[in-house]
């Protein structure tokens, strides 16, 4: 049933990192600063800590069914029909929704920041064309592409942080823990909900890594590194721009890039730095569309998921346009609804599956054979 | 074969997209605005935009006299800034493009009325960057400042920009404020904004004509002078040069500045500050806030008017003490003036209290202006004289 596509653990880790950074790198500093103020960076660290706590659950599920993806063991655990229905709910309620929001995010970002008169549809369609093509090529090419682009993303990120470091003002981080720990935790849970609880969709890719143990390690590494990058960007945003600016801007890390000015010579390179966001968001979308396509193919017993990518992308465009009427709505959704909603699928769904799996004695128990082909 | 044909067709169809942006505007469709002046006229805003005339700015060999001015000034009045920018097209053949803006001038009337509303559109609009300087026209309108040609720097907005930056570097009592800095100061509790003032001297009637720059000394001259003190977003008064320097010391924006220190009766010695670092420390004792300002600076001797023996280490330490007193007096005077006259915390003392004692700040912040006026501020200065220049003892001492 399952496509015999294989990706290396390294590639899986890179995909996880790109997926985590995704669109969050643009908006997370602002969301964190809104709650935790100048302690946003502490919130980021706390969030990574909290986020890591969910990974064992995902890995436990993945290792229980080392050669099956989430869609398949959903059916095994819950029975054919209930499993299919539950998984469909998950698909629509989680990866699909995230994909639509991510798409909306990049559309908003480009239309607010740079291409102000370009219709948002055009941007979405161009991005999705690449995504659809990527998914059509399959998981292996996606993974290889991620491997190729990743060093550039890291290099540019490093340069971005290096170039703004002359503007670092540590006093922007004071006073330390002004309102106690509560706002910091509130901020942390924002980051936990977006994106640290979202790797659950990666369970669709997990079995494609030949050795579950390595896949698990890759997931750990990916989430940790992704989280650390978000932490670094938050720290730099707040200490360079000051909490008031970060809080007020929709895309603080873009503002950060605008700050770059090395000797009046190397300046106005934010368009170059946009490479970071475009690439990470592209991979986030590609991974999500892959997950939805593969999931749908599995649920409806289709032979191939690849042909689903194009129609899915068409639907996604419409979804992204309909789902959010304006920027304020998106902000309110991100701050109030998503942080609670995410637990349905990010925590309870896999937890339920795992418990049901144990109760119904499905899958491998503690004994693990790593050499499963 | 067919496949190849289709692919070629697709690629050809994709070609037009490579052109890039959706609403591309070529350089010859843009009016590049380098200077922007905003005045308040009654209920309306008067915008004065200084647009470059590319033909006149492009280097012309042979030194032929320019026929036209290097910039064009468009000015009109509308109900909002945004409207005014758009309305500009009724006068200008090209759309105003503000991304390269160097200087933004508020007329004194507009500044007194409040700059918050104006700053909203400027920070909201994506075409404005945040790296231009913001200044206030002292005792005149922004239009008058924009309507003046300058020498050496052909484009007046560029001259205003460079002049402020240079003055910041080596003179001191000015401060270059960019949009993000200003907005932060407006939002932050416990720190009121300050902008540098620009003044116009001389004969305004020909300031905007080429005649103005055809003389060794232009008829109308633009000069920076004094800082504008704001409370919230409204201008409430001005600091003189001495107090402006005091402000610069407290806020640690001094990079280099001359210190004039008395060395004997009626005579002075000039010291050049080459390095300066100010630290501020605040604490709250029994609910009463206080601030300590500590300045450390390194100076060189530049100009000596009295007959002292600079070769003696005692003289040097004597001079250091005097320099300390000089800077201390400077800062104390500035703080006192602002406390008494304006009651606006431009020094950021409140912010410092906030940082050092967030709990106490919560109680203090509501009535901070009144508390700021009473705030005890102690100043400590530590001056180190490093070098004496290329000669030793003062010439005046060696003269027979």
Image (cartoon, coloured by chain):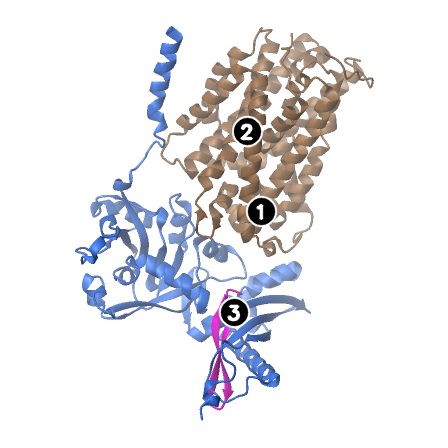
Chain colours: A brown, B blue
Circle 2 sits in a helix, a strand or a loop, which is it? Answer: helix
Q: Which residue is mark 3?
A: B274
- Element type at marker 3? strand
Q: Residue under circle 2?
A: A149
User: Does the magenta run of residues contain B104?
Assistant: no
Q: Residues within 10 Å of mark 3 (few under 14, many from 20)?
A: some
- Using the image as rendered, state which of residue B379 and residue B26 is in the foreground: B26
Residue found 42% across the figure and 52% down from its top: B131
> In the figure, is residue B255 to the left or right of A73?
left
Q: Nearer the viewer, residue B36 or A175?
A: B36
The answer to which image quadrant residue B73 occupies is: bottom left
- Marks 2 and 3 sit apart, C-alpha to C-alpha, by 47 Å
Q: What type of secondary structure mainly makes up the magenta span?
A: strand
Foreground: disc 2 or disc 1: 2
Figure label count: 3
Q: Chain of mark 2?
A: A
Disc number at residue B127? none
- Left or right of B190? Residue B145 is left
Mark 1: few, some, or many residues within 10 Å (few <14, many ≥20)? many
Q: Residue furthest bottom?
A: B400
Task: Identify the magenta region.
Answer: B252-272
């Amino acid at each position: 049933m399952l496509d015999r596509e294989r990706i290396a653990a390294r590639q899986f880790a890179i995909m996880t990192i790109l997926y985590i950074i995704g669109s969050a790198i643009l908006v997370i500093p602002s969301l964190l600063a809104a709650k935790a103020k100048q302690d946003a960076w502490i919130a980021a660290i706390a969030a990574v800590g909290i986020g890591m706590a969910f990974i064992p659950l995902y890995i436990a599920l993945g290792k229980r069914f080392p050669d099956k993806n989430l869609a398949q063991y959903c059916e095994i655990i819950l029975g054919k029909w209930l499993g299919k229905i539950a998984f469909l709910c998950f698909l629509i309620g989680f990866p699909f929704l995230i994909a639509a929001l991510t798409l909306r995010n990049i559309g908003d970002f480009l239309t607010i920041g740079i291409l102000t008169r370009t219709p948002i549809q055009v941007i979405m369609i161009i991005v999705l064309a690449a995504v659809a093509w990527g998914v059509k090529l399959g998981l292996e090419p996606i993974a290889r592409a991620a491997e190729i682009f990743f060093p550039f993303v890291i290099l540019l990120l490093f340069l971005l942080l290096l170039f703004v470091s002359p503007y670092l003002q540590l006093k922007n981080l004071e006073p330390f823990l002004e309102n106690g720990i509560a706002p910091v935790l509130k901020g942390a849970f924002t980051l936990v909900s977006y994106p640290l609880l979202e790797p659950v969709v990666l369970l669709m890719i997990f079995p494609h890594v030949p050795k579950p143990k390595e896949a698990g390690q890759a997931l750990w590494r990916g989430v940790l590194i992704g989280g650390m990058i978000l932490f670094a960007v938050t720290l730099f945003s707040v200490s360079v721009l000051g909490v008031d600016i970060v809080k007020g801007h929709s895309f603080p890390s873009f503002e950060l890039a605008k700050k770059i000015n090395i000797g009046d010579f190397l300046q106005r390179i934010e368009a170059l730095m946009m490479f970071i966001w475009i690439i990470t968001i592209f991979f986030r979308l590609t991974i999500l569309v892959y997950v939805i396509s593969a999931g749908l193919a599995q649920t409806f017993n289709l032979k191939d998921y690849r042909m689903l990518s194009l129609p899915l992308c068409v639907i996604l465009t419409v979804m992204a346009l309909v789902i959010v009427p304006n920027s304020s709505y998106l902000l309110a959704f991100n701050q109030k609804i998503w942080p609670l909603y995410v637990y349905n699928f990010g925590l309870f769904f896999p937890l339920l599956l795992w418990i049901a799996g144990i109760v119904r004695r499905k899958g491998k128990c503690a004994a693990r054979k790593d050499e499963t082909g | 074969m067919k496949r190849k044909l289709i692919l070629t067709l697709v690629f050809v169809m994709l070609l037009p997209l490579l052109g890039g942006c959706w609403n591309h505007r070529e350089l010859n469709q843009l009016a590049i605005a380098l200077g922007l002046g905003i005045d308040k006229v009654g209920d309306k805003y008067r915008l004065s935009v200084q647009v470059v005339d590319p033909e006149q700015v492009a280097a012309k060999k042979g030194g032929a006299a320019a026929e036209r001015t290097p910039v064009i000034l468009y000015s009109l009045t509308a109900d909002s800034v945004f409207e005014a920018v758009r309305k500009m097209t009724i006068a200008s053949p090209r759309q105003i493009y503000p991304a390269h803006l160097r200087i933004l001038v508020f007329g004194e009337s507009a500044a007194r009325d409040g700059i918050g509303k104006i700053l909203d559109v400027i920070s909201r609009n994506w075409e404005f960057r945040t790296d231009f300087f913001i200044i206030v026209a002292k005792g005149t309108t922004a239009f008058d400042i924009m309507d003046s040609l300058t020498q050496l720097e052909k484009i007046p907005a560029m001259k205003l920009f460079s002049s402020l930056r240079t003055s910041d570097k080596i003179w001191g009592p000015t401060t270059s404020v960019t949009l993000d800095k200003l907005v932060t100061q407006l939002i932050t509790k416990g720190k009121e904004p300050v902008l540098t003032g620009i003044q116009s001297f001389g004969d305004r009637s020909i300031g905007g004509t080429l005649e103005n720059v055809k003389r060794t000394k232009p008829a109308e001259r633009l000069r920076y002078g004094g800082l504008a003190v704001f409370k919230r977003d409204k201008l409430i008064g001005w600091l003189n040069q001495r107090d402006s320097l005091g402000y610069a010391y407290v806020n640690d924006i001094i990079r280099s500045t001359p210190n004039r220190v008395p060395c004997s009766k009626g005579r002075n010695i000039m010291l050049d500050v080459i390095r300066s670092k100010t630290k501020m420390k605040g604490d709250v004792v029994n609910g009463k806030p206080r601030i300590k300002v500590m300045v450390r600076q390194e100076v060189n001797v530049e100009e000596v008017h009295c007959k002292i023996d600079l070769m003696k280490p005692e003289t040097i330490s004597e001079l250091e003490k005097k320099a300390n007193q000089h800077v201390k007096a400077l800062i104390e005077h500035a703080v006192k003036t602002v406390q008494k006259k304006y009651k606006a915390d431009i020094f950021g003392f409140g912010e410092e209290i906030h940082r050092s004692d967030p709990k106490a700040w919560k109680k203090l912040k509501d009535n901070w202006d009144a508390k700021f006026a009473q705030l005890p501020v102690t100043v400590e200065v530590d001056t180190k004289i490093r070098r004496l220049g290329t000669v030793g003892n003062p010439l005046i001492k060696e003269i027979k």
